Image: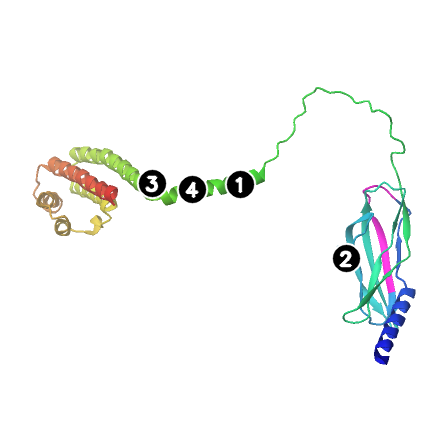
Amino acid sequence: MRGLFFTLFCLFTISVAAQDNKPKGHFLKDSVKIGETVPYVFSYTDRRNRPVIFPDSLHDFSPFELVDRAYFDTKSDSIISIDSAVYYLTTFEIDTVQKLSLPVHVMLSETDSISVYADMDSIILNQVVLQMPDSVALEESAHYRPVGLQFNYPYWIIGLIILGIIGIIVLIVYGKTIRKKIQLYRLKKKLEKFNISFDEEISGLNDDPTKEKIEHVLKFWKTYMEGLEKVPFTKLTTKEIALLHENSSLEETLKSIDRNIYSPIKVNALQNDFEFLKDYSLDRYNHVTEVIRNA
């Protein structure tokens, strides 16, 4: 019991000493306008190295509002420590005189503290409008004044999210069908372009039936077939192509064209050979598209 009373007595003595040593706080201006920022200087002197806590942004500064704050390093000598800060405050209250007193929290132990308040300081509100009129004469204007439109970002973001969700649902449900239609459309456009260009190549071959021109037209056909079948036609020989497709008519046609290219003897009927290759390309196109539709 004596130990308990002694502890309570010590805490009471420290508390009274702390309360006697009040922090100091005052405004740096005598008056302030509504919405104007005014500095409030706050400092506390205590024995060396005793922990103290200053008000932060969570503190209620009524009737003022905290705009900013600046803390300064503790200044100490062999006996005392001085802590200081500047609080930048503003007010939107209309009271003529507004007062403020801030506390400092002195740590008596690891689990106990005491709040010591500075003396109340006051500041005068500088009222710009001293008297409100009974009525206000408003001036009417019917002139058009253009106003810039603001982009509604929240609705835009919500719209993008909704479109994204719809897009994902469409891809999940109809994605395979859409990919098939796109693939078939591209193959159709490539066939149409090939037919037109191949006819032009054959027509040019009739005007200039050189071995180089024949080889060029054959390579043009192989390039289209390579894109259609996904097989390296341009790197395959006639024998390899015949083994791959197992079509005797195709084999005979390619051999006939090869004879025109590599044989010193001129062979006729090239028109029929290339027309056959064109028809064969159409047959392979129908086969490939049918496979895609049934996939």
Whether residue 112 can be seen here: yes
Q: Quadrant of residue 273?
A: top left
Q: How is the image coloured?
A: rainbow
How many angstroms separate mark 3 from mark 1 (CA)? Answer: 26 Å
Q: Residue 178's mark?
A: 3
Q: What residue type is labelled 4?
A: Gly
Question: Which residue is at 88% across, 49% downward?
Answer: 99
Q: Which residue was labeled with disc 1?
A: 158
Q: Which residue was labeled with disc 4?
A: 167
Q: What residue type is labelled 3?
A: Ile
- Label 1 vs 4, first from the N-terminus: 1
Which of label 3 and label 1 is nearer to you? 1
How many angstroms separate mark 1 from mark 2 (CA)? Answer: 37 Å
Q: Residues within 10 Å of mark 3 (few under 14, many from 20)?
A: few
Percent position of residue 121, x then y: 90, 52
Q: How crowded is mark 2: few (under 14 residues within 10 Å), some or many (20 or more)?
A: few
Question: Which residue is at 54% across, 41% downward?
Answer: 157
Q: Which residues make up the magenta segment?
A: 32-44
- Label 1 vs 2, first from the N-terminus: 2
Tell whether 132 sits left or right of 274: right
Viewport quadrant of the C terminus: top left
Q: Residue 250's mark?
A: none
Which of label 2 and label 3 is nearer to you? 2
Secondary structure under tag 2 reads loop
Question: Which residue is at 12% across, 49% downward?
Answer: 242
Percent position of residue 14, x then y: 88, 71
- Label 2 vs 4, first from the N-terminus: 2
Say whether residue 95 is magenta.
no
When the figure is inspected, residue 83 is found, relative to residue 167, above or below; the finding is: below
- Label 4 vs 3, first from the N-terminus: 4
Q: Which residue was labeled with disc 2?
A: 56
Secondary structure under tag 4 reads helix
